Amino acid sequence: MKAQKTETMKIPEEEKRLERQLCFAVYSTAHAFTRAYKPILDKVGLTYPQYLVMLVLWEKAALPVKSIGEQLDLDSGTLSPLLKRLEQSGLITRTRDPKDERQVIVSLTPDGDRMRAEVDTIMMAIGQSIGCTLEDMAKIREMLQGLRTNLTAA
């Protein structure tokens, strides 16, 4: 995905409409994803951001808060309340790193680890909502990751 120089492009008026904006398509799709996930995640007692945290922890059972925040692109002000609610739900624990007291390590509890079994059900349900094949999803994901890379570098 190569960036074009905008100074040499003449943008047609039709492309300036809200529904033609790529940023709005991504924004509104993100909201649609969150709405689609809500009834699915309500069944397991998670919000969408909490589900993302759990996905990170299901890959690695224990991580520093900073690492989770970096993977999810969340600041500590947003992440800390999420972690607090997950801890109150009995899915994670937060402990100070004995090697570096400044760091907090987030770990799955046995209940949090057992919840991993729900991932297939969640993914199947959202996959049906999306209406794409795994190959389609891989292509879309790749394009979005390239877009994010370009935006981050800009």
Image: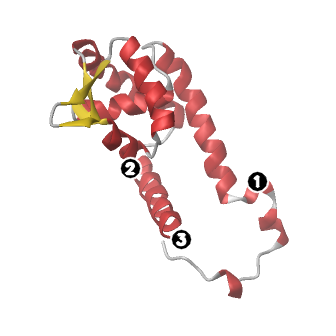
Image position, residue 149 (x, y; %): 45, 63
- Pointer 1 or 3: first along the chain: 1
The span from disc 2 to disc 3 (Cα, nearest Å) is 29 Å
Per the image, label 2 sits on a secondary structure element best described as: helix
Image position, residue 94 (x, y; %): 29, 23
Residue 25 vs 110, above or below: the answer is: below
Identify the residue at image location x=31%, y=43%: 67
Residue at the left extreme, as displayed: 99
Residue at the front extreme, as displayed: 101
Q: Is residue 70 visible?
A: yes
Please give the residue where the numbered disc 2 appears in the rendered image: 135
Image position, residue 124 (x, y; %): 40, 28
Identify the residue at image location x=82%, y=66%: 14
Please give the residue where the numbered disc 3 appears in the rendered image: 154
Residue at the right extreme, as displayed: 13
The span from disc 1 to disc 2 (Cα, nearest Å) is 26 Å
Nearer to us of marks 2 and 3 is 3
- Pointer 2 or 3: first along the chain: 2
In the foreground, 50 or 69: 69
